[in-house]
Image (cartoon, rainbow, N blue to C red):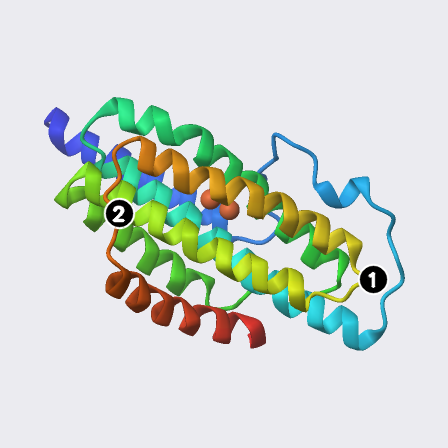
Amino acid sequence: MNPKALNLIDQFIIQADQALRTLVAGNDRSCERPSPAMQTQATELSDADRKLSAALMRVNHTGEVCAQALYQGQALTAKLPQIRLEMEKAAEEEIDHLVWCQDRLDQLNSHTSLLNPLWYGMSFAIGAGAGLISDKMSLGFVAATEDQVCKHLEEHLQKLPADDQQSRAVVTQMLEDEAKHAQTALDAGGYRFPAPVKTLMSLASRAMTKTSYHI
Ligand SMILES: [Fe+2]
Ligand SMILES: [Fe+2]
């Protein structure tokens, strides 16, 4: 078999492995940093509060699934290896977020969204598609997405039950990291998307947050 075909098969296996490790519950991923939830006092939540926290953390988990897919798609098509390196730290922090959200959902006796495979596929296609256009475009897309995520996380900090200090600690650290990721993508040469494009993106992300909140 020629090396080009082998390379394609390799890439397919690597991408399929990453997708499975992101999507399959009980994945073997470990995080670099311990969950911020571990540094706070666990409190007993009412049933209503537990359900509210679980719904919000499920939305956040889906956001992290999308981040995995977006960064994977971007790394696959990034033209400059230096861009890949610059975004690597952000991609590693996204794994922490994914694991923290999954752990918190487990602690809340809840589940991840059933629609995650769909969102993973769409985000991967967008990340890879933007990367095929240019590195500037894909980095711009990462920056605009991270801005969007920051807005959601700020909203969630308003909505999360005051007693749920553990979820709050996770979301607070994520918010700090996502703001850094947006800046990293812009510093690496990302295109600043105009406001109308950002509005379209926020409409699309509403579909994700609305469905993940419930299923
Ligand atoms: Fe994240
Ligand atoms: Fe991020």
Q: Residue at x 26, y 39 (%)?
A: 190
Q: Quadrant of the N terminus?
A: top left
| Residue 111 visible in the current orientation | no
Under circle 1, the secondary element is loop
Residue reaching furthest to the front:
195
Circle nearer the viewer, 1 or 2: 2
Instruction: Report the side of 78 relative to 117 (left or right).
Output: left
Q: Residue at x 32, y 67 (%)?
A: 199
Residue 150 location (% of width, % of height) = 50, 53
Instruction: Report the side of 178 relative to 48 (left or right).
Output: left
Q: Is residue 195 above or below residue 70?
A: below
Inspect the image, locate mark 1, and give the three-letter code of the amino acid beneath it: Asp
Q: Nearer the viewer, residue 11 or 44?
A: 44
Q: Residue at x 86, y 52 (%)?
A: 42
Q: Quadrant of the C terminus?
A: bottom right
Q: How many marks?
A: 2
Q: Residue at x 47, y 37 (%)?
A: 180
Please tell me in which quadrant of the rendered image residue 133 appears.
top left
What is the number of the mark on residue 192?
2
Q: Nearer the viewer, residue 117 or 119?
A: 119
Inspect the image, locate mark 2, and give the three-letter code of the amino acid beneath it: Arg
Q: Is residue 177 above or below residue 160?
A: above
Residue 153 location (% of width, % of height) = 56, 57
What distance separates the C-alpha of mark 1 from that of mark 2? 38 Å
What is the number of the mark on residue 163?
1
Instruction: Report the side of 1 relative to 11 (left or right).
Output: left
Mark 1 Cβ and ligand 1 under 8 Å apart:
no
Residue 117 location (% of width, % of height) = 42, 61
Under circle 2, the secondary element is loop
